[in-house]
Image (cartoon, rainbow, N blue to C red):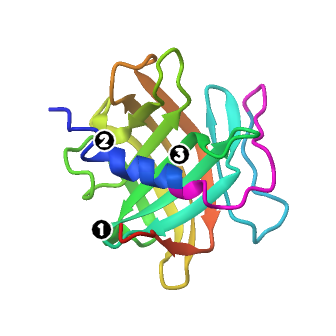
Amino acid sequence: MRRNFSLVFGPLACISALLLTACNHEQPATTTDKAETPTAPADPNADFVTWTQDGQVYKATDVSAFRYQTLPVISINGGIVAEGQGLSERTLTLSIPTTFAKPGTYPLPQSGNSFSVVSGQLVLPPAEASTPRSYSTEFGPAAANGSLTLTECNPQAQRFAGTFEFTAKSMSTASPATQTVTAGSFRLTKLQVAPNGI
């Protein structure tokens, strides 16, 4: 049974998107017209989140890692902010239950419990609809929908790094019904506490 978007995925996805907008963004979003392998920034210590979708490489202009006071997860977030706008128009989130917060490779399964499995979410700009299109691996399309490899995961030292790929299913009737993310990678060196008691 499909879970209620507003009660489960909605808060975390919206929270991640809103928290991303609080970060400083120095460069506009960048994409390429053809598929290529994402590469880390020239600065070996710079934080980044990058992925390929529909043949384009996306490099987040806002990146963050959050832990929550009321949710047993750590979220890795990458947002692309449209030039001249304050809100992310495209957001990728990896949700990692605190019980899995250690190096290793984890599947992204279909699941009815948001906070017991590693999951990937993608929020895309509206097409013809008036609301963003949201996709989650927890909705399928298959029993297993990708993987996340944490090469570094140290909440105490505030260091996170890894690679990921997944296929996520629309949580509504958005077209297309699925979105596939490949060649994803990230590095983050600051774990923030979500504000306002979240």
Q: Residues within 10 Å of mark 3 (few under 14, many from 20)?
A: many
* Labels 3 and 2: the sequence-earlier one: 3
Cα separation, mark 3 vs mark 2, equals 14 Å
Taking the spot 54% from the left edge, 19% from the top edge, the residue there is 127
| Quadrant in which the N terminus is drawn | top left
Q: Which residue, given by chain and number where applicable, does mark 2 sit on?
A: 138
Q: CA distance from mark 1 to mark 3?
A: 19 Å
- Asked if disc 3 and disc 2 are in contact, CB closer than 8 Å, the reply is no
Residue 195 within the magenta-colored segment of the rendering: no
| Lower sequence index among marks 1 and 3 | 1
Q: Amino acid at mark 3?
A: Leu
Question: Is residue 34 shown left or right of residue 86?
Answer: right
Observer-nearest residue: 155 or 108?
155
- Magenta-drawn segment: 19-35
The residues tagged by marks 1 and 2 sit, at their Cα atoms, a distance apart of 16 Å
Residue furthest toward the left?
A: 1
Q: Is residue 23 magenta?
A: yes
The label number, if any, that marks residue 72 in the structure image: 1
- Say what secondary structure mark 2 lies in: helix
Q: How far from the left and from the top, in percent, is residue 4?
A: 22, 38
Residue assigned mark 3: 92
Q: Position of residue 137 (x, y in %)?
A: 36, 39
- Majority secondary structure in the magenta region: loop
- Callout 3: helix, strand or loop? strand
